[in-house]
């Protein structure tokens, strides 16, 4: 220990930076030499476990006493994860106020205090903040004075907005925002979700209740939507730079949504409703479709027709419960889609169940895909006998003489 203590302060602080904050703080009892070294750490993390009352009181006292004395001129990241019911909102507000004054670059807060405004007003004008992640029912009452000129990543999970205007007021004052994630679990005070961000590159939305959408993100390259509501309506402006999308919706009308994502190169989709005519996915090369009940064949036919340059198709069965899975009939296209004749090269079916409709869909693709190079079937052999599956598909005719048919156990 004496040899290590002889190293320069900056080297010792560098060593401490690789240890968890709690371990780094514990070195302060080693000697006078180590007493304040941890206070130069630029990455701090507190909480993350269930505390007894005495443990929480100790942590609270420690933060109250030591955080204002922290010596690093810039805090690179500060992570606070606390779920104690005795936590006081004013305590968190004070701690956040301290790290904001230290030019914090990345701030992550999880708090179990529902509907509590724990964010100081200075947070909304923090010039240094690059990454902000809030989780846990925090009340987001955005003041009129907002300016976050450096913020590039924003995650809002489980937060409660003061009103419909709160989110858009925040977003409109983040001029370089690139990555936004919003997960809405509560209907309180939020009936319309508005996202107007010209600089945004990535957008991820998780919605668990009915609300209206308005999205205008002309620079977007990646879009994820998980919608668990019954009948949400979408108003989405065109996304001309969109390259990849993940769409998982239940019963919403997806026509306007589909119309805004036709520029994608990669698409993953699960939907209980099909979209209408008039859409062409000229750039779509990689399609992953989740196969469930009767809607699956309609979506597959639609995408095969509307994706003339599709190169890779992956089907993934949603359920492995044969007894509770409804039967549906495979209505094959009246004419062979263009992608089957000229571009489709790889076909994979994950969690293949071997139902009659599954077999018919797979056989159709093998029979008509003229340029197919590989066809991989990952079967759930707990539910479908492997020999029967191989026999059914291996004896089917193939349009491509060079296609390699591969069978693997996809059970998990």
Image: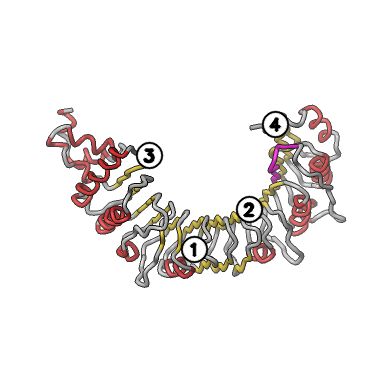
Closer to viewer: mark 2 or mark 3: 3
Q: CA distance from mark 3 to mark 1?
A: 34 Å
Q: Which mark is residue 408?
A: 4
- Density class for disc 2 (Cα within 10 Å; few <14, some 14-19, many ≥20) is some
- The magenta span reads 314-322
Q: CA distance from mark 1 to mark 4?
A: 40 Å
* Residue that label 2 marks: 248
Q: CA distance from mark 1 to mark 2?
A: 21 Å
* Residue that label 3 marks: 49
Q: Is residue 274 magenta?
A: no
- Tell me which colouring the rendered structure shows: secondary structure
- Density class for disc 3 (Cα within 10 Å; few <14, some 14-19, many ≥20) is few
**Nearer the N terminus, badge 3 or badge 4?**
3
Q: Is there a contact, CB below 8 Å, between mark 3 and mark 4?
A: no
Residue placed at 31% from the left, 60% from the top?
128
Residue placed at 49% from the left, 65% from the top?
189
Kindly state the secondary structure of the residue where label 3 is placed: loop
Residue 383 vs residue 56, the one in the foreground: 56
Q: Determine whether, in the image, residue 84 is placed left or right of residue 352.
A: left
Report which quarter residue 48 is drawn in.
top left
Closer to viewer: mark 3 or mark 1: 3
Q: CA distance from mark 2 to mark 4?
A: 27 Å
């Amino acid at each position: 220990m004496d040899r290590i203590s002889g190293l320069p302060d900056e080297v010792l602080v560098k060593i401490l930076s690789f240890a968890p904050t709690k371990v780094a703080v514990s070195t302060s009892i080693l000697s006078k030499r180590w007493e304040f070294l941890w206070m130069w750490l630029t990455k701090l993390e507190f909480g993350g476990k269930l505390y007894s009352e005495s443990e929480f009181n100790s942590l609270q006292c420690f933060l109250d006493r030591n955080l204002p004395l922290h010596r690093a001129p810039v805090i690179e990241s500060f992570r606070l994860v606390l779920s104690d019911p005795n936590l006081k909102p004013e305590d968190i507000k004070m701690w956040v106020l301290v790290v904001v004054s230290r030019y914090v670059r990345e701030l992550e807060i999880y708090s179990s205090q529902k509907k509590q405004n724990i964010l100081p007003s200075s947070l909304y004008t923090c010039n240094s903040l690059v990454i902000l992640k809030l989780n846990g029912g925090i009340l987001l009452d955005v003041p009129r004075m907002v300016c976050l000129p450096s913020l590039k990543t924003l995650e809002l999970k489980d937060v409660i907005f003061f009103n419909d205007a709160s989110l858009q007021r925040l977003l409109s004052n983040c001029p370089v925002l690139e990555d936004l994630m919003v997960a809405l679990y509560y209907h309180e005070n939020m009936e319309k979700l508005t996202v107007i961000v010209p600089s945004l590159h990535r957008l991820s939305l998780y919605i668990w209740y009915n609300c209206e959408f308005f999205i205008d993100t002309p620079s977007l390259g990646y879009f994820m939507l998980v919608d668990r509501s019954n009948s949400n309506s979408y108003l989405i402006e065109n996304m001309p730079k969109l390259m990849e999308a993940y769409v998982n919706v239940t019963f919403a009308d997806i026509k306007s949504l589909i119309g805004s994502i036709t520029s994608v190169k990669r698409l993953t989709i699960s939907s209980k409703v099909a979209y209408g005519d008039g859409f062409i996915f000229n750039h779509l090369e990689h399609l992953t479709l989740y196969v469930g009940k009767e809607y699956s064949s309609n979506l597959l036919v639609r995408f095969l027709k509307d994706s003339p340059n599709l190169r890779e198709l992956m089907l993934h069965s949603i359920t492995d419960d044969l007894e509770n899975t409804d039967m549906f009939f495979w209505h094959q296209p009246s004419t062979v889609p263009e992608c089957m004749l000229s571009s489709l090269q790889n076909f994979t079916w994950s969690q293949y169940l071997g139902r009659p409709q599954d077999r018919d869909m797979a056989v159709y693709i093998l029979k008509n895909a003229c340029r197919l190079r590989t066809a991989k079937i990952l079967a759930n052999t707990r539910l479908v006998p492997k020999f029967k599956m191989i026999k059914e598909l291996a004896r089917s005719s193939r349009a491509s003489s060079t296609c390699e048919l591969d069978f693997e156990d996809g059970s998990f």
